[in-house]
């Protein structure tokens, strides 16, 4: 594995990708900071470890997140830092735009768009202040989706927020690069994950969607969760000193 920063932060740590990343990165770092929304069943073994700080947090509430991210910087002397944002909300209504409720629309925007704004503001306010007098590196990775460029039938709001996330990445990267802060978005197609924690209707949706998407890939298969975690690990590693402002697609050759 590439050399990782001393401190590694994951927002959305109980998600399928977040929990797998946390387990993969745990032996490689001095401090592991895990943020989760409500549940901890995937990360229960980690949060009891002494080198892990864990926080329950609602990313829609900026003041709540800011208080907890400030607490991290008070409790830990952070040199090089990796921070990964994995919003867990999905386009669960599967309806055309005209039939999508305003409540669901607002929920998706608040988590996927305002959520990443809250995450970046809370993190960068601390990191930019610290970076004025040091040369420490900060690598940030956001989890997007291939739908940012191809759209998503019956998931237009979700798709729009992922496109906004990628554009935000490009803009913020230009603003913070001088402080040795790199930020990228990974936008995969469907990813094979552990389905055991999903509801039956969502498992059925995933299976049907995955089958249709395989036909569009050059490899005729879906990305594994390990492939996504490995890419995240490279982008957050200290070996990555020049890749920033990018949206990196992982689609098996699908266009």
Image: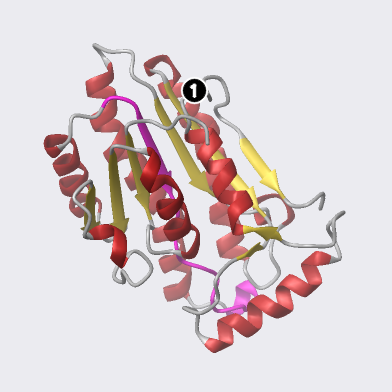
- In this view, the residue in front, 176 or 198, is 198
Scheme of image coloration: secondary structure
Q: Position of residue 48 (x, y in %)?
A: 21, 60
The residue positioned 65% from the left and 80% from the top of the image is: 205
The residue positioned 56% from the left and 20% from the top of the image is: 242
The total of numbered circles placed on residues is: 1
The residue positioned 30% from the left and 55% from the top of the image is: 35
- The residue beneath circle 1 is 174
The residue positioned 28% from the left and 61% from the top of the image is: 58
Q: Is residue 97 above or below residue 135?
A: below
For mark 1, does the 10 Å Cα neighbourhood hold few (<14), some (14 to 19), or many (20 or more) residues?
some
Q: Position of residue 124 (x, y in %)?
A: 31, 32
7 left or right of 243 in image: left
Q: Position of residue 110 (x, y in %)?
A: 39, 59
Residue 117 appears in the rendering: no
Instruction: Work out which residue is located at the far front of the displayed protein and give it.
Output: 27
Residue 93 lies within the magenta run: yes
- In this view, the residue in front, 26 or 247, is 26
Q: Position of residue 57 (x, y in %)?
A: 25, 59
- In this view, the residue in front, 144 or 118, is 144
Q: Is residue 251 above or below residue 231?
A: below
250 left or right of 20 in image: right
Residue 187 appears in the rendering: yes
Looking at the magenta stretch, what is its main secondary structure?
Answer: loop
Residue 91 lies within the magenta run: yes
- In this view, the residue in front, 201 or 194, is 194
Q: Using the rendered view, name the quadrant where residue 181 is placed.
A: top left
Q: Which residues are magenta?
A: 79-99
Instruction: Work out which residue is located at the far bottom of the displayed protein and give it.
Output: 200
């Amino acid at each position: 594995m590439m050399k990782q920063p001393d401190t590694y932060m994951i927002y959305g740590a109980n998600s399928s990708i977040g929990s797998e990343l946390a387990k993969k990165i745990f032996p490689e770092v001095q401090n592991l900071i895990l943020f989760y929304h409500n549940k901890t069943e995937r990360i229960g073994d980690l949060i009891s470890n002494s080198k892990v700080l864990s926080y329950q947090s609602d990313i829609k509430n900026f003041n709540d997140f800011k208080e907890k991210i400030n607490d991290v910087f008070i409790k830990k002397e952070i040199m090089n830092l990796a921070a990964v944002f994995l919003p867990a909300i999905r386009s669960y209504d599967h309806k055309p735009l005209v039939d999508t409720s305003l409540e669901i629309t607002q929920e998706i925007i608040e988590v996927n768009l305002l959520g990443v704004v809250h995450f970046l503001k809370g993190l960068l306010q601390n990191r930019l202040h610290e970076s004025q007098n040091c040369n420490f590196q900060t690598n940030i990775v956001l989890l997007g989706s291939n739908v940012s460029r191809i759209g998503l039938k019956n998931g237009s709001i979700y798709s729009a927020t992922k496109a906004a996330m990628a554009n935000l990445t490009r803009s913020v990267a230009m603003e913070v690069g001088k402080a040795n802060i790199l930020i990228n978005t990974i936008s995969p197609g469907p990813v094979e994950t552990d389905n055991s924690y999903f509801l039956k209707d969502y498992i059925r949706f995933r299976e049907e969607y995955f089958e249709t998407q395989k036909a569009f890939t050059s490899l005729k298969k879906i990305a594994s969760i390990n492939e996504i975690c490995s890419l995240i690990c490279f982008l957050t590693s200290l070996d990555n000193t020049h890749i920033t402002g990018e949206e990196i697609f992982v689609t098996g050759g699908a266009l």
